Image (spheres, rainbow, N blue to C red):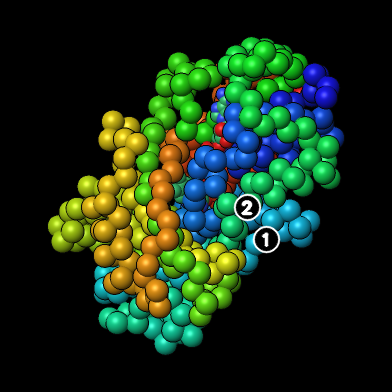
Amino acid sequence: MPTKYDVAVIGAGIVGLAHAWMAVRRGLSVLVVDRTSVAQGASVRNFGMIWPIGQPAGELYSTALRSRELWLELARENAVDLAECGSIHLAHRDDELAVLQEFCDQGTHAADMITADQVQQLSPLANLTELRGGMLSRTEARVDPRKASAGIARWLSEQHDVTFQFDTAVCQVSAGSISASDGQSWQAERIIVCGGSDLQTLFPQQLQQAGLKLCKLQMLSTPAQQQLQPDSPHIASGLTLRHYTSFEACPGHQQLRQRIASETPELDRFGIHVMASVMPDRRVILGDSHVYDNEVTPFDSIEINELILRELRKIIQLHNWNISEQWHGLYAKHPQLPVVEAEVEPGVHICTGTGGAGMTMSFGLADRIWNRWAGEC
Ligand SMILES: Cc1cc2nc3c(=O)[nH]c(=O)nc-3n(C[C@H](O)[C@H](O)[C@H](O)COP(=O)(O)OP(=O)(O)OC[C@H]3O[C@@H](n4cnc5c(N)ncnc54)[C@H](O)[C@@H]3O)c2cc1C
């Protein structure tokens, strides 16, 4: 195994893989180092939703759509299994329907209002009781998060000669060199640290000063549900309208937010909105909640899981509501930026903080960053 590379990436989550891919697209030799034997961070713990509809109009939405194109390229290369499933935001209340209508009227995203009957035809998941209608967007896609990162790593290794060094914790990085805790070391002209929610090990002061927040999310999964198709559209709820910034420009957004806060303050306390995503093996991934910084503990709250399920029962129907798995994930997030990227030493970059949109945005963001670097040369 060589010890010198053009590019070294620390972290084999989706952000690290995106940078590794952008580097090999430019003909560079690449090493990826991760402390675990397979990726185990946020990139395997999510819904597997590629979710452009959550990005506000303008550069972020375009970046998400560029990312989506790159995901489709990976699917054509058989690196990942991807369904172009689209998404439906369900409206079970009049104010939710009104915000969705306002959003569609803006014409900024490829989304259309649909009636309750159309929802029924498109989604076996939707709970039709009190359903007012919904919004269909065709830009969303689904990957299986437990397989996607491993599949991309395998493809990068087999098709593009990327070297993966798993089970290896990097303890020091300085301009041009990387040292692991087991004594191994490598040299690289450009080093990109994509450590996800690990804000302590490498460049902790810079990460701290960047204003990143840590967020913990609780998630659930059902057993396989044979009546569901793996390309069923993702489902989001009226609660979701207060989670993604894309809806903030709608005139009725603030009032909707206030109504939810006064009716169900417990949902705001735990940052709960609800979504459902059908996996290729027909399990349904359900979630989620958001608690930040000092409130992050290793212990999962039964109360939060029960609230998530209470809200999900209002918007979806399942033949089998048994829960087969529950887990939590952590991500780093910047309050305003889609990612924190900074050169901390000559040729050494930190890149993290994709928050709840890393699966959606990482390829597009990495593409943008590498185009910028090319312009700087
Ligand atoms: C529950 C949950 C649901 C989500 N749902 C979605 C979704 O549906 N759609 C979406 O777009 N986004 C979603 N997200 C966000 C998305 O998953 C994250 O933004 C993204 O996965 C972050 O990727 P990452 O590579 O930065 O981090 P990670 O996936 O955590 O990877 C970081 C890697 O760095 C390694 N590492 C760290 N430090 C070192 C070191 N010193 N030496 C060696 N290795 C190191 C770790 O082992 C890890 O493998 C969700 C996140 C969570 C937690």
- SS for tag 2? helix
Residue positioned 70% across, 16% down in the render: 184
- Percent position of residue 320, x then y: 40, 74
In the image: residue 141, left or right of residue 373: left
- SS for tag 1? loop
Q: Is mark 2 within 8 Å of ligand 1?
A: no
Residue positioned 83% across, 22% down in the render: 2
Choose mark 1 or mark 2, whichever is in front. 2
Residue positioned 52% across, 40% down in the render: 41
Disc 1: which residue: 81
Q: Are marks 1 and 2 in contact (CB under 8 Å)?
A: yes
Image quarter (top left, top right, bottom left or bottom right) of the C terminus: top right
- Percent position of residue 348, x then y: 64, 19
Q: Quadrant of residue 134?
A: bottom left
Total numbered badges shown on the rendered structure = 2
Q: Quadrant of residue 324?
A: bottom left
Disc 2: which residue: 147
Amino acid marked by disc 2? Lys
